[in-house]
Image: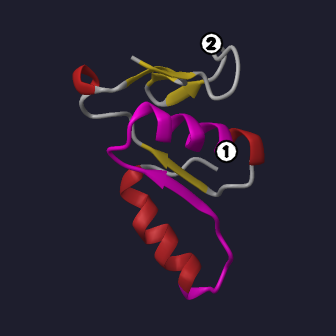
Amino acid sequence: MIILDSEVGNYITSCIHLELEMQLIGRMLETRLGLGCSVHMAAGLGTFDFIDLDPHIDPENEPFMGGPEFTAPFYSLSNVQGGIGVQKR
């Protein structure tokens, strides 16, 4: 199921009202290190109903390099060689 951002709040509210169990993973303003962990967990478990992993907002000041690559609206793990693929600059 694909849900647009504008519909997410209404859908979550409906699910809560109906007492449905849902799993959500989200992140905001973390470094590539946090992002790498979140993307790997979401991809590895594959059990999340909602995935809201925003890209880093300030790449020039990012203390890490590597990890998942973002091409809106998807993350790719194909370039990760080992671990979560993140290294300190």
The residues tagged by marks 1 and 2 sit, at their Cα atoms, a distance apart of 16 Å
Q: Amino acid at mark 2?
A: Asn
Disc 2 element: loop
Was residue 40 drawn as part of the magenta stretch in this picture? yes
Badge number at residue 82: none
Q: Quadrant of residue 19?
A: bottom right
| Other-residue count near label 2 (Cα within 10 Å), few / some / many at <14 / 14–19 / ≥20 | few
Is 61 left, or right, of 9 in this rendering? left
Which of disc 2 and disc 1 is earlier in sequence?
1
Q: Which sits in the foreground, 88 or 60? A: 88
Residue numbers of the magenta segment: 17-42
Q: Quadrant of residue 56?
A: top left
Q: Which sits in the foreground, 59 or 48? A: 59
Please report the residue visible at 36 percent of the width from the left and 56 percent of the height from the top.
Answer: 6
Mark 1–mark 2 CB contact (< 8 Å): no
Query: According to the image, label 2 marks what residue?
Result: 79
Q: Position of residue 44 (x, y in %)?
A: 75, 41
Disc 1 element: helix
Q: Position of residue 43 (x, y in %)?
A: 70, 39
Q: Amino acid at mark 1?
A: Met
Q: Position of residue 34 (x, y in %)?
A: 48, 41
**Number of callouts:** 2
Badge number at residue 41: 1
